[in-house]
Amino acid sequence: MSVLDTEIASQPQLWRQMVELAPAYCDILPSPGANVVLVGCGSSLHMAEAYAALRRRTGAATIAVPSSEATMMTLRSADMVVAISRSGTTTETVVALERVAGKVRTLAITAGSGSPLAAAAEESIVLPQIDERSVVQTRSATCVFELLRATVDEAGAAEAISAAEVALGASVPDIAGVDHVVFLGSGFSIGLAGEAALKVLEMSQVVAEWYPAFEYRHGPLVAARPGTVVWWLSPVDRRLFDDLATAGVRQVEFAFDSAGSLVMAQRFAAALAIGRGLDPAAPSGLPRSIVLD
């Protein structure tokens, strides 16, 4: 088993740890009524988007923005700014926290012990056990989401663990002839769909997109073709499903939590990469962390 395979397979066990750890961090994680802005880049941003959607479902004012787009007005409008970065060295995310130091309550979530991000934050959650040797993020991103999800949707977090176990035991969808993948989500699974698309693009260099499920009809559908796979992380809309099937588009759907479907998408992305002669764990030209001068 490769390093990447081991990291992907470790997710259910680590997710259990995250659910068990969540109560210990309740005093520093966002309170139910807090106005929260989350910042991150890449995989961290997608996990922030998913968590923000879950908090909004409870009525809590929460948004997720790319660290590079986090204006002072946006950051200062919050009761709390939460910054996510695997390494804790991502320049844009560190800068976003430094800009509001002492003005807004700040929390860093990272796998990087002694990182600049943790140093810039008022409080930090450091999770070295979720870190990876691979350049491409899998478990580090999903573990942060599972930790956060457990604070607002404990039942869903538990269901996700079971779903991930099922996903790891199931066969990977056929990769033959795939040259375009579209992930569809709704609610919090839109963020997970974005992360799934990023995994396919990073690992395999196959064109991958993501949309809210009902937005797919509004333009992007025209690019669907026989080489396209449409992957449902949201409940399937049968009318759209039937239209795509008529057009010869392959579709993937699973009857389990969308976080489990993301685990399957990670495996699918790795298989696509290997099928194209690429290293899914360390894509050419992709650094482990984006650190700008």
Image: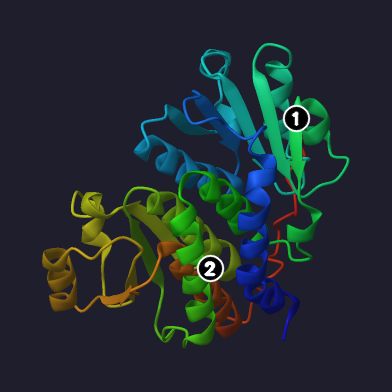
What residue is pinned by disc 2? 161
**Residue nearest the viewer, comparing 225 with 196:** 196
Residue type at tag 2: Ile
Disc 1 on helix, strand or loop? strand
Q: Position of residue 180 (x, y in %)?
A: 39, 69
Q: Position of residue 217 (x, y in %)?
A: 18, 54
**Residue nearest the viewer, comparing 288 with 118:** 118
Q: Quadrant of residue 189?
A: bottom left
Give the label on residue 45, or none: none
Q: Position of residue 127 (x, y in %)?
A: 76, 51
Q: Quadrant of the C terminus?
A: top right
Marks 1/2 in contact by CB < 8 Å: the verdict is no
Disc 2 on helix, strand or loop? helix
Local packing at callout 2 (Cα closer than 10 Å; few below 14, some 14-19, many 20+) is: many
Residue drawn at x 20%, y 79% is: 248
**Residue nearest the viewer, comparing 163 with 280:** 163
* Left or right of residue 9: residue 115: right
Q: Quadrant of the N terminus?
A: bottom right
Q: Taking 251 as reference, is 259 above or below it?
A: above
Residue drawn at x 52%, y 27% is: 36
Residue drawn at x 53%, y 13% is: 73
User: Looking at the image, which residue sits at the far right?
Assistant: 114
Q: Taking 224 as reference, is 114 above or below it?
A: above
What residue is pinned by disc 1? 123
* Left or right of residue 23: residue 260: left
